[in-house]
Image (cartoon, grey):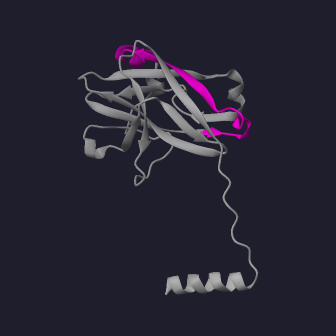
Amino acid sequence: MTKLLSFLFILASASAGAKAPLAVKSVPVSDVKITWKYENFPLKIQIADIKEDKKLFISETRAFQKKEDSIITKVWPDATVAAKHKDSTPFALVIENPSSEDYYFFAVPHELNPHHASAGHYFECLCNGRVFKVPAKSTWYRIVRLNLNDSFQNLKTFEINHQIIGLQKNEVLLNYKERLYEPN
């Protein structure tokens, strides 16, 4: 019945002189390379796709131990995000911690290269003044989002650089306890 109604609507539109829909204009894309410099932090941050069937929220930060609890579908080996202009590009930052030790870190505010790209982006990432805990024998993740505006139309590639600073547990509890963000 639905197909018949759709066919009748198309037929009626065509006979009334309606124009066919215009082709959708492609949205420009910039390749964004995300890099990490580590200080006193032995684990590595990876970028990954998120399962589409999961209801997730930007800045959601969690850890899981069982693979079936994973929200990750594919890790991007070259850490390059294809970000659409005037749109949000969500993805996951992922840290695997196979050790029996908890790790703590914070991120220094990111820097863009070329620097003039700073005026046209908004990246909800890790550099928010929080100290993060990566639990032992788990995979930690944070859902982030990158937004680009029109100023990127002529910029095909750029880099976002972060510095990750590792902290000791006693240092966190003594100096940063109120800034500690533990995964749910």
**Image location (x, y in percent) of residue 87:** 63, 46
Along the line of sight, which residue is nearer the eye, 71 or 138? 71
Q: Is residue 22 left or right of residue 144?
A: right
Q: Assign the C terminus to one quadrant of the image.
A: top left
**Image location (x, y in percent) of residue 15:** 72, 85
Tell me if residue 164 is in the magenta stretch. yes
At horizontal 53% and vertical 21% (from top left) the residue drawn is: 162
Q: Is residue 41 above or below residue 82?
A: above
**Image location (x, y in percent) of residue 42:** 35, 16
Outermost residue, top direction?
A: 40
Along the line of sight, which residue is nearer the eye, 151 or 55? 151
Q: Is residue 149 left or right of residue 65?
A: right
Tell me if residue 165 is in the magenta stretch. yes
Along the line of sight, which residue is nearer the eye, 62 or 151? 151
Q: Is residue 10 above or below residue 83?
A: below
Q: Is residue 90 above or below residue 42?
A: below
- The residue range painted magenta reads 147-175
Along the line of sight, which residue is nearer the eye, 162 or 176? 162
Numbered disc total: 0
At horizontal 69% and vertical 82% (from top left) the residue drawn is: 13
At horizontal 58% and vertical 40% (from top left) the residue drawn is: 83
**Image location (x, y in percent) of residue 91:** 48, 40
Displayed quadrant of residue 76: top left
Displayed quadrant of residue 100: top left
Q: Is residue 154 left or right of residue 130?
A: right
Outermost residue, right direction?
A: 17
